[in-house]
Image (cartoon, helix red, strand yellow):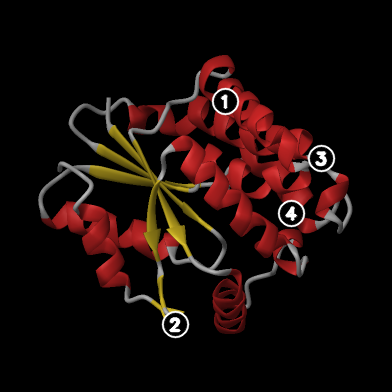
Amino acid sequence: MSKFIVIDGLDGSGKGSITRMLRDHLTKKGIENDLISFPMYDLDSSVPVKLYLSGAMGNDPEKTGGYAASTLFATDRYVSYRTYWHTLYEKEGSVLIADRYTTANAVHQLTKLPKEQWDDFLFWLFDFEYNKLGLPTPDHVFYLEMPPHLCRKMIAKRAAQTGRTIDIHEKDPSHLDKAYEAALYAGEKLHWTRLKSFEGDDVRPLDSILEELLTHLAL
């Protein structure tokens, strides 16, 4: 089996850039690797997720409860695993890097529940995906921590540069604040490795984040 590494964080925290930089680093070292990113928008498995994030089920993400929304994202992971990336995971001596994973449901869907239900939801979520569905359990999860106000700045910058459509989570002014709190809680509870992607009131250099990440990996 591959070594399976997950990198997660709020939108705009730099996880996409760090996953690509990690892959470049491994390639230069001669370590075979692959990169997957969720949702898998290029595959049919992501159709339910696209409907949800586009607002086809309603522009208020709160209307699709945490458990219901989680099953949409889990469907994408399960179908894409069975039809595509199981071969990447099963490679011996390789490293599989995931930009988001089940961890993203913990970050974004936990926000829809009262705090006294958070532990029950986390148990259900990871039991559902890793045990009931049989999806691979990551060897290491890295969470890129960036405060919501900086995330909003980076999201707006990215949208202006790329023309990327902002989804219903990004449109909700309160979602990032709630997701930030939920992510810190889940990360502590589930022992994710937290990497700060900010310095004071500014964005931390990506090279510095990657260097710290590599200190936690025996590659």
Residue contact between numbered discs 1 and 3, judged by CB atoms under 8 Å:
no
Where residue 122 sits: x, y (%)? Answer: 61, 32
| Circle nearer the viewer, 3 or 2 | 2
What residue sits right under mark 2 in the picture? 202
User: Nearer the N terminus, badge 1 or badge 4?
Assistant: 4
| Circle nearer the viewer, 2 or 4 | 2
> Could you tell me which residue is drawn at 39 percent across and 65 percent down?
17
What residue sits right under mark 4 in the picture? 53
Give neighbour class at mark 1: few <14, some 14-19, many 20+ (Cα, 10 Å): many
Viewer-proximal residue among 59 and 47:
59
| Circle nearer the viewer, 2 or 1 | 2
What is the C-alpha distance between the residues marked 2 and 1? 36 Å
User: Nearer the N terminus, badge 4 or badge 3?
Assistant: 4
Q: Which mark is residue 65?
A: 3
In the image, 60: left or right of 146? right
What is the C-alpha distance between the residues marked 3 and 2? 34 Å
What is the C-alpha distance between the residues marked 2 and 4? 29 Å
Residue contact between numbered discs 4 and 3, judged by CB atoms under 8 Å:
no
Check disc 2 and give the amino acid type: Asp
Compared to residue 124, the image places residue 31 above or below, namely below
Residue farthest to the top, as pictured: 132
Check disc 4 and give the amino acid type: Leu
Residue contact between numbered discs 3 and 2, judged by CB atoms under 8 Å:
no
Q: Which secondary structure, mark 2? A: strand
Residue contact between numbered discs 2 and 4, judged by CB atoms under 8 Å:
no
Check disc 1 and give the amino acid type: Glu
What is the C-alpha distance between the residues marked 4 and 3? 13 Å
> Could you tell me which residue is drawn at 64 percent across and 24 percent down?
124
User: Nearer the N terminus, badge 1 or badge 3?
Assistant: 3
What residue sits right under mark 1 in the picture? 129
